[in-house]
Image (cartoon, grey):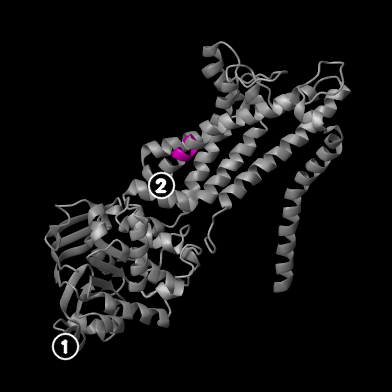
Amino acid sequence: MRTLTDHAVTGLAVLATVLVVAPLVAIFVYLVYKGASSLNLDFFTQIPKPVGESGGGMANAIGGSAMLLGLGSLIGVPIGIGGGIFLAEFGRGTKLANAVRFTADVLNGVPSIVMGIAAYSLVVVPQGHFSAFSGGVALGIMMIPTICRTTEEMLLMVPNAVREAALALGVPNWRSVLAITVKTASPGIITGCMLAFARVAGETAPLIFTAFGNAFWSSNLNQPIAALPLQIYVYAISPYEDWHRLAWAGALVLIVLIVLAVSLVRYVTSRGVLKGAS
Amino acid sequence: MGVGIEVTNLNAWYGTNHTLQEINLKIPANHATALIGPSGCGKSTFVRCINRMHETNPIARVTGTVRIGDLDIYEDAKPVEIRRRVGMVFQRPNPFPTMSIYDNVAAGLKLNGYSNRHELDEIVEKSLKNSALWDEVKDDLRKKSGASLSGGQQQRLCIARALAVDPEVLLMDEPASALDPVSTSKIEDLIFQLKSQYTIVIVTHNMQQAARVAENTGFFLNGRMVEFDSTHKIFTNPSDKRTEDYITGRFG
């Protein structure tokens, strides 16, 4: 009977795993099926061709997405990690910390299009035009709550014994937090940042009224800029067969790039880890 | 060299819980002093008052005087300064999990801004030799994490880490209670060697251990110190009935 129960539970766990992974695999296979045939060098080197001409690529959108995500991370990662450190280490139990935690949770649930409107009214309206900068701000704000809360959770998982060990050596608290606690929790914190990054990398809605999209090359923070999700959106709802194919290819590239970026960060940050460190 | 510790009218609270009541005690320099007593009697709180770790808990409070050498630790100095002069070894080995063996030992110095590489190398070697760990780890100092060592080795690593900042007093809060008998006897040998250089205060549940390593023993019960005397007297001819009941195993 006991082995039977054991098998049943194992079976259920495997089934659940399959159910989780299956859609992911299905989406990826379908993207490869639909998009791989339109992938060529032009896709990565050319900007979009005018309607009617065949060929062209999404080089500007790939570059634009990289810039927007870079800018978003520059804003979201430090603020998010800083907020998480405050919640877990300095503000524990204070009213301010509770307010910050509540705000972060609410912010996490706000629909992404609302973030776009917020960035629109905060940056686009005062500036008077759409810009890459405003898109970066929208993505950055979206990253903050995820990073903040995972940072807090990861720091709280560091055993108190480790904090005490540092304090008992006469290390000032702020230094113990930065050099010991945060360092101990860093693999988890990095995972949180990666999650937030991957999430906003595919966001379209907050970019519609901020980055706006651009059919040409631009590296100017003050000008509208192309982004992969935006380009996919525009191409997918267009009436042209040619553009549909490019949209599929774009979606495939977007997923592959996210996986590559996450893997790269993991690889770089896991180097130098010592044997036996948990 | 170690220095003596003089405790006068020490009281400590956690919230409304009065965990230490009117403790008066003189701990002699360069001796090992054991503190025994049943769980929850205030031994750990007492040692945590000597390096001001007690107050890292936000609901904790202390009154009274603790002098280490000539220094009144609650009046004349900041907690971080006290903790550099009073090292501490905890019940469970707590090496920094992301650091190498070398960095664990050097942590106290490095995090206090000390960066002379050559001297750090020397101090790390000396500390590991003093904690009788050097021969076992000298080839993996920078390659292995402190967390990869066995429990007994980790505890000696923690002792080396405490010694590296060159304290005058070493507090040990049940340092061997999570270890096997072989590791325990290594720690006890170590205490024997270290007391020529440091004043050692060791909290223990193991009365044989107290008898083996300490010249003086204090018996705590319900937040008060019942008796403090030479270990020999405490274990053979205690003056207080409660001490006798405890060491003969009638309670606790």
| Residue at image location 86% in from the left, 17% down from the top | A53
Q: Which residue is mark 1?
A: B237
Chief secondary structure of the magenta span? helix
Q: Is residue A93 visible?
A: no
User: CA separation, marks 1 and 2?
Assistant: 52 Å
Decide: is B145 above or below A116. below
Q: Is residue A115 visible?
A: yes
| Image mark 2: chain | A
Q: Residue lying farthest top? A: A128
Q: Which residues are magenta?
A: A79-83
Whether residue A269 sits left or right of residue A169 in the image: it is right
Decide: is B117 above or below B198. above
Amino acid type at circle 1 is Asn
Label 2 CA crowd tier, 10 Å (few <14, some 14–19, many 20+): few
Quarter of the N terminus of chain B within the rendering: bottom left
Whether residue A61 sits left or right of residue B107 in the image: it is right
Residue B149 lies, in percent from the top left, at: 48, 70
Q: Quadrant of residue B55?
A: bottom left
